[in-house]
Amino acid sequence: MSELDQLNEIPLFPLRAVLFPDGVLPLRIFEPRYIDMVRRCMRDEVNFGVVLIRDGSEVASQDNAVPPNVFRVGTEAKIVDFNQADNGLLGIVARGGRKFQVEETYQQNDELLIGRVRFMGSETVGSLGEEHAALLQILKDLLQHPLIQQLNPSVDLEQALSVSNRLAELLPIEPEIKQTLLQMSGPNERLTELKRIVGKFRE
């Protein structure tokens, strides 16, 4: 059985944010279930999954015992840095890995959501053409922004895959649109849709 056919159990972190492969996601964590999840991931050197919330809340409460409804395609997240703030918040930086398809979910006693997932195959790297020049310039401009420079994003400006993922990640667009871009099967399809989105900005 190939890795793509295997079901893997991973903890899920439902957010109102979308993580792309090789993307950087800083998180401030205060809920015990996620602090425990981060500690386990670091101790056992395992990753968790980031999934976009379709409806529901990021934060558990007595009034909100039902787990949030999440989209079925997410991204593996590897913890690459962490710090403990004085106010008790745990700060981590996660980097996006493989995309995955969520087959089913269940909730542990501590209300942590666990997903049974299949990891998806790597997309083709692809190359950029003249038709992508405007998108490339937008990405270059975004990369000059001080807040984005703090994230130190990893990007190869000659690869269609890298450019399409970073642009989808950094553009100020709704999470649901980012999710649609994440779910696309390759960089050319993503770049075509990004070109359409940017065109609407300029109308």
Image (spheres, grey):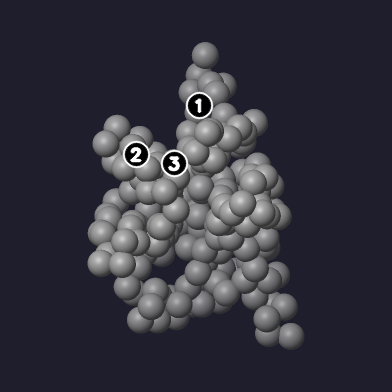
- The percent coordinates of residue 175 (x first, y second) are 62, 63
Mark 2 vs 1, N-terminal side? 1
Taking depth in this image into account, of 97 and 29 the one nearest to the observer is 29
Q: Secondary structure at mark 3?
A: strand
Q: Residue furthest bottom?
A: 203
Q: Is residue 92 left or right of residue 23?
A: left
Q: Secondary structure at mark 1?
A: strand
- Find disc 3 in the rendering and name its residue: 48
Label 2 and label 1: CA atoms lie apart by 15 Å
Please tell me whether mark 2 or mark 1 is closer to you in this view: 2
Identified by mark 3, the residue type is Phe
Identified by mark 1, the residue type is Asn
Taking depth in this image into account, of 29 and 88 the one nearest to the observer is 88
Label 2 and label 3: CA atoms lie apart by 7 Å
Residue for point 59% across, 54% down: 61
Q: Quadrant of the C terminus?
A: bottom right
Based on the displayed image, in which of its 4 quarters is residue 105 positioned?
Answer: top right
Identified by mark 2, the residue type is Cys
User: How many C-alpha atoms fall within 10 Å of the one at disc 3: few (<14), some, or many (≥20)?
Assistant: many
Mark 3 vs 1, N-terminal side? 1
- The percent coordinates of residue 143 (x first, y second) are 40, 75
- Find disc 2 in the rendering and name its residue: 41
- Find disc 1 in the rendering and name its residue: 8
Q: Is residue 146 left or right of residue 33?
A: left
